[in-house]
Amino acid sequence: MPGMDHGSSSSTASDAPASGANDADTMFAAMMIVHHQQAVDMSDLVLGKEGIDPRVVDLAERIKAAQAPEIEKMQDWLDDWGVDAPSGGIGHGDGMMTEDDMAALEAASGAEASKLFLEQMIVHHEGAMAMAETQIADGENPDAVALAESIASSQGDEIAEMKDILGSL
């Protein structure tokens, strides 16, 4: 009958108006937490090595300094939105490194580790930029969209920097 809700609504808690976030916002935050955590892990790996190009050390430190607080911010958003924080991984197509990729970075040393970190982080950042562009297009939460814009801009700049460093290694 018209006007009666028979439980057929397809809305979820994440797109309820009171939450201030739609499905794109919650997906972005959940996936970007996992993505950022891997970038922090990659940075930790390279920062724990000797003989790393100083420009790579500086970049890895800046990546950690930027992304660790963003992880906390996005976890707070998910809490506010009533969405569970992610527990699993996301696909390699999102720029995520495989276990083999991470093992190769862990096993590398010196100049080889510097080069591998840069090559892997370029792919990783490209994945984050694609995720950010989707959020900018589909997201509703102004803070999440603003973060996506910031990620797209800063990681685009870092990709250019990494390509420059790679060209001179």
Image (cartoon, helix red, strand yellow):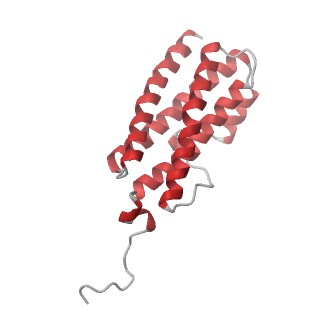
Res 15 quadrant in image: bottom left
Give residue 131's position: percent from left, percent from top. 44, 43
- Residue at figure coordinates x 63%, y 24% from the top left: 116
Give residue 132's position: percent from left, percent from top. 42, 41
Q: In front here: 161 or 119? A: 161
Q: Is residue 132 left or right of residue 110?
A: left
Instruction: Tell me if I can see residue 96 in this picture.
Output: no
Q: Tell which residue pokes out farthest to the top in this image.
A: 168
Give residue 85's position: percent from left, percent from top. 58, 56
How many numbered badges does the structure rendering display?
A: 0
Q: Tell which residue pokes out farthest to the left in this image.
A: 2
Q: Is residue 115 left or right of residue 3?
A: right
- Residue at figure coordinates x 38%, y 37% from the top left: 149
Give residue 128's position: percent from left, percent from top. 48, 38
Q: In front here: 91 or 141? A: 141
Quadrant of the rendering where the C terminus is positioned: top right
Quadrant of the rendering where the N terminus is positioned: bottom left
Asked if residue 113 is positioned above or below residue 41 in the image, the reply reads above
- Residue at figure coordinates x 60%, y 15% from the top left: 55
Res 43 quadrant in image: top right
Asked if residue 5 is positioned above or below residue 168 in the image, the reply reads below
Instruction: Tell me if I can see residue 131 in this picture.
Output: yes
